[in-house]
Image (cartoon, rainbow, N blue to C red):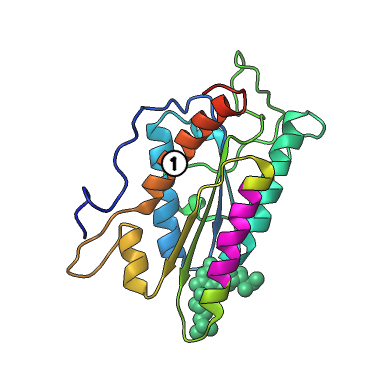
Amino acid sequence: MSDPTIKGLPPPPTKFDGSNFRIAIVHARWNDAIIKSLVEGTINKLKEQGVKQENIVVKSVPGSYELPFATKQLIEAGKIQSSNAAPSMIASTTNLLSLIDNTTSQPSTEKKTDNASNSGPLTKPFDAIIPIGCLIKGSTMHFEYICDAVTHGLMKVQLETGTPVIFGVLTALNDDQALERAGIGRTEKGKGHNHGEDWGLAAVELAAQNQDWSKGIL
Ligand SMILES: Nc1c(NC[C@H](O)[C@H](O)[C@H](O)CO)[nH]c(=O)[nH]c1=O
Ligand SMILES: CC(=O)[C@@H](O)COP(=O)(O)O
């Protein structure tokens, strides 16, 4: 593990309050032991910053290549919900969170409101999206092409929609690199650091900063 004072993410300059944010996580299902750890680390860090469990929407797709499309569609779905133009579009899908204790990822289907005086999940547009995937190099160029397509695709979605999209995709040359970055390393280097925690931090910070920037507040 490198020296965290040289390489790594220092604590944020300001503590951001996530209590009124709505965040979507969309995770690939390839390499699910790694994904499960990354998703858990992300959610724990979101909740540590005040994001409410019911305001964290979790969806899954087969692989990382599907993440850009899913991210863009989730952003659009969040906007449709907030316009009350359609009943809740949250539908249950299979995802790894059902395997994680005390984390419910299947919100109820009854209509909710984003009125602060009512309980229940927010239905406003998502304040940030966290696509999570793990690409591990095989023996062909498949890895390189997917990494490139996904990276550029997610950046394109972010800039086109104006919604913060956190880059939560590991691009590992071997299993151990991925395991270490999910905080479940198994070599003499130790367990490593769960990068999902960094992604949860980044999501709340960008949601907070973007909330001001989109109102012209600097
Ligand atoms: N090899 C990995 C994949 N491959 C699957 C693609 O992402 C995609 O789902 C498929 O090509 C169908 O469009 N996905 C990962 O997330 N991680 C891998 O290591
Ligand atoms: C990231 C990938 O697509 C890779 O795991 C596929 O392996 P291979 O290149 O051996 O087909």
Place of residue 112 in the rendered image (x, y in percent of width and height, measured from the top left): 68, 26
Instruction: Label 1, secondary structure: give it.
Output: helix
Compared with residue 78, is residue 217 higher up or lower down, i.e. above or below? above
- Bounds of the magenta span? 146-158
**Residue 54 percent location from the top left of the image:** 54, 33
Q: Residue at image x 66%, y 54%?
A: 70
Instruction: Tell me which residue sits at (41%, 62%) in the image.
Output: 34
Q: Is residue 67 visible?
A: no
Q: Is residue 161 left or right of residue 63?
A: right
Residue 185 position by quadrant: bottom left
Local crowd size for mark 1, using a 10 Å CA cut-off: few (<14), some (14–19), many (≥20): many
In the displayed image of the protein, which residue is found farthest to the right? 85
Q: Which residue bears the numbered disc 1?
A: 202
Q: Provide residue 38's location: percent of width, then percent of height.
A: 41, 54
Position of the N terminus, as image quadrant, is bottom left
Q: Amino acid at mark 1?
A: Ala
